[in-house]
Each structure stands twice: as structure tokens, then as C-alpha cells.
Image (cartoon, grey):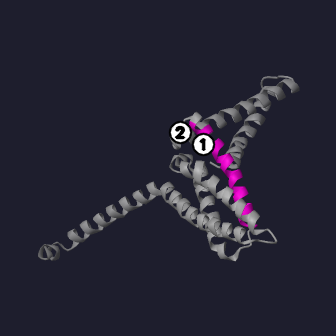
């Protein structure tokens, strides 16, 4: 669940609890104004904390993760977000028209992988190579390419280095594309299974509807 939405839900429940607790303490129980206020704040804070614990537990259960696993994944996703920012900064600094399409594709794929693994943390394990190897290589290469291509004067050695870097980036873009396919591989398998089931159901209905025709075809 989105953290902002989760916070609003907790607040939506905790605020009325705080108000009701204050009214109960102040009127029927005849507590002092400050005592009622203290109990009301404690009641609201406790409600907020209990709901937060319930939301976190439900989230981990839904994604089949332990708290330790989730902390590990969250830490790596946070670091990856910073790397992707660096990557995008370098990508859009490059003024080389020959690699525009390539850079747009790299930007799209890296953001897509990060977005999917943030939304469904369990997918992180299918994208470990991307996070621990390929993303770092992309950042280093694009920063190097951006630096070299921005130089006002370039000799033949620099030109050759730019060509090699561009080729390597092209190969890496294909590698991260495979990373994306790996992340969504379960979805593809599920979809194929559902297609097979649907086809089988359709065929069965046809056989029931036109039994004689199917008998002659056999």
C-alpha cells in the first residue's frame, strides 16, 4: 500500500478515537480537562501504532516476506533509486543524437524494473543481477560517456573510446531488457496457463454445442 494512503487511513481512524476518548473521560468519567486530553492523546497514538503494525504485518504476509527480508530489499531499493537518478542525469546530459533511442530505452527499462520491485518487493529476487551488477555498469558507463562527449575538443582516441562505450551500452541495454523479462517471467507463465485453460474451455463448449459435427471431424 502507498505509505501516504496508509497514513491517511490510520489518521482517519485515530482522530475519531482521540475525540471519543476525550469526551468519555471528560463527561461520564468526570476526569479533569488535562487528564482527559492526556488519555485521548494516548488512545489516539496507540490506535495509530496498532493499525501501523497491522498494516505492516498484512503487507509482509501478502508478499510472503519476513521483516528481515523486507528491510534488506527496502535498503537496496533505496540505494538503487539514487543510482537511477545518477543514471538519468548522465543520460540526459549526453547530446549524441546517435544514441537517443538507446538512452530512452535504458531509462524506460530501469525505471520499470525499479517501479515493479518497489510495488511488489518479492520480485527483487528475480532482479538481483540488475541491482547488484548491471545497474552499476550502466551508471559508470553513462557517466563516462557523458563526460567524454561533453569535451570541446576530441582526438581520435577519445572518439574510439566513445564508439566502444556506445557499443557496450547497446549490449547492456539488451541485458537489462532480459532482466525485465526475468522479473515478469512468472506473469508470462501465468498468462500462458490462463490462455491454455481458456482455449480448452472454449473447445469443450464447442464440442458440447456441435457434438455431431465434431464426431464427423474426428
What residue do we see at 87% from left, 26% from top?
Answer: 34
Q: Residue at x 71, y 51 (%)?
A: 82
Residue 3 falls inside the magenta stretch = no
In this rendering, position of residue 40 left or right of residue 71? right
The residues bearing labels 1 and 2 have C-alpha atoms spaced at a distance of: 10 Å
> To which residue does mark 2 refer?
65
Query: 196 or 81, which lies in front?
Result: 81
Residue highlighted by disc 1: 73
- Crowding around mark 2 (Cα neighbors within 10 Å: few <14, some 14 to 19, many 20+) is some
Q: Are marks 1 and 2 in contact (CB under 8 Å)?
A: yes
Q: Secondary structure at mark 1?
A: helix
Which residue occupies the extreme right position in the image? 33
Mark nearest the camera among 1 and 2 is: 1
Residue 106: percent from left, percent from top: 62, 64
Q: Nearer the viewer, residue 190 or 12?
A: 190
Residue 62 placement (x, y as % from top left):
52, 43
- Compared across the picture, whether 215 is left or right of 49 comes to left
Amino acid at each position: 500500500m502507498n505509505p501516504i494512503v496508509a497514513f491517511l487511513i490510520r489518521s482517519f481512524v485515530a482522530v475519531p478515537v482521540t475525540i471519543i476518548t476525550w469526551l468519555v473521560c471528560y463527561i461520564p468519567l468526570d476526569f479533569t480537562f488535562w487528564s482527559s486530553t492526556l488519555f485521548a492523546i494516548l488512545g489516539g497514538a496507540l490506535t495509530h501504532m496498532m493499525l501501523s503494525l497491522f498494516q505492516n504485518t498484512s503487507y509482509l504476509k501478502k508478499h510472503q516476506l519476513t521483516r528481515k527480508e523486507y528491510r534488506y530489499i527496502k535498503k537496496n531499493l533505496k540505494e538503487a533509486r539514487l543510482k537511477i537518478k545518477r543514471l538519468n542525469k548522465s543520460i540526459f546530459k549526453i547530446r549524441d543524437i546517435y544514441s537517443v533511442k538507446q538512452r530512452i530505452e535504458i531509462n524506460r527499462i530501469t525505471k520499470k524494473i525499479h517501479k515493479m520491485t518497489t510495488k511488489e518487493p518479492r520480485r527483487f529476487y528475480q532482479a538481483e543481477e540488475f541491482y547488484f551488477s548491471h545497474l552499476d555498469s550502466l551508471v559508470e558507463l553513462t557517466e563516462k560517456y557523458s563526460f567524454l562527449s561533453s569535451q570541446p575538443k576530441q582526438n581520435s582516441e577519445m572518439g574510439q573510446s566513445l564508439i566502444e562505450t556506445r557499443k557496450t551500452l547497446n549490449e547492456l541495454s539488451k541485458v537489462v531488457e532480459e532482466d525485465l523479462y526475468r522479473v515478469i517471467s512468472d506473469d508470462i507463465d501465468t498468462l500462458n496457463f490462463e490462455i491454455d485453460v481458456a482455449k480448452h474451455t472454449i473447445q469443450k463448449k464447442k464440442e458440447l454445442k456441435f457434438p455431431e459435427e465434431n464426431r464427423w471431424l474426428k
